[in-house]
Amino acid sequence: MLRTALQPRWLALLALVLVVCAVFGWLGSWQLGVARDRGAQAAARELRARPAAPLDQVLMPQRSFTAQASGRQVSVTGTYDATTTVLVPERLQRGRSGLWVVTGLRTEAGAWLPVVRGWVASADDASALATSLPSGRVTVLGVLQPDDPPADRAAALPPGQLQQVDAADLVNRWGAPIYNGYVLAATESGVASGPQRVPAPAVAPQGIAWRNAAYAVQWWLFAGFALVLWWKMVRQEQLDRSTDRAGVDERVAIG
């Protein structure tokens, strides 16, 4: 069998089959990528189409931030505390570096919620925003985001500034209970003007388009079938030769 497979014409055919298998494998990988992209796009459309939910239906104070909460539109009612405002520097907006204005909202559940109220070009601009902070009960509509990852290295910052929006840092300033994660505010009731709103980042939900995934599997099956077909052809050649040899030997014995 091996001697037959190593004949030049079968080796040439094997080389052709391997090229075909490589093409089929690439087509399968491409279809799998399409399946993931289309699935993610469909999941993103579904996420954007979902109506805003009350915050406590999505995330509870002192609870871990879940993947399902990321990018979810929520509404929450509470009272701002101007003394909790902190600035987060080195935040880009439309290609410009500035600061996020983050204020603690004491929700009706009695917990602190970090709210990114907007972006300013400099810390001096932020000082003029105290008058834009609504007093009394306010309803915030925005998008949930997980805490920022820890900074690679600690930086010396002026008082009232933090490197990242992180509940672990803010709880030391504001106290507990506190929500893990923060809200990028889109609207605030009773607010006519304020810092520039920070657009929600593009979500990257997981999903898959099963039709394209099936195409991917189909291409890979074709590649496997090509190899099996080559092997069966070699085996048939060997069987035919064995049959012919047996016939010759039988005739010689009879003669």
Image (cartoon, helix red, strand yellow):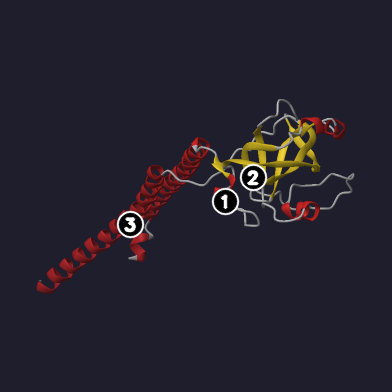
Residue 97 x/y as whole percent: 79, 34
User: In the rendered view, does 9 fall on the left or right side of 121?
Assistant: left
Residue 245 x/y as whole percent: 21, 66
List the single residue furthest toward the top. Answer: 192
Which numbered tag is attached to residue 67? 1
List the single residue furthest toward the bottom. Answer: 253
Q: Amino acid at mark 2?
A: Gln
Residue 104 falls in image quadrant: top right
Give the spatial CA distance, label 3 vs label 1.
43 Å
Q: Amino acid at mark 1?
A: Ala
Query: Mark 3 highlights which residue?
Result: 228
Compare marks 3 and 1 and give the one earlier in the sequence: 1
| In this view, the mark in front (2 or 3) | 2
Number of other residues with Cα within 10 Å of mark 3, as a class: few under 14, some 14 to 19, many 20 or more: few
What residue sits 71% from the left and 37% below the top? 136
Q: Is residue 193 above or below residue 74?
A: above
- Give the position of the N terminus as an image quadrant: bottom left
Which numbered tag is attached to residue 211? none
What residue sits 9% from the left and 73% below the top? 254
Give the spatial CA distance, label 2 vs label 3.
51 Å
Callout 3: helix, strand or loop? helix
User: In the rendered view, does 245 fall on the left or right side of 219?
Assistant: left
Query: Mark 2 highlights which residue?
Result: 145
Residue 186 x/y as whole percent: 64, 33
Compare marks 1 and 2 and give the one earlier in the sequence: 1
Q: Is residue 134 above or below residue 158?
A: above
Residue 98 x/y as whole percent: 80, 34
Callout 1: helix, strand or loop? loop
User: In the rendered view, does 140 fall on the left or right side of 155?
Assistant: left
Q: Is residue 254 above or below residue 89?
A: below
Q: Amino acid at mark 3?
A: Val
Number of other residues with Cα within 10 Å of mark 2, as a class: few under 14, some 14 to 19, many 20 or more: many
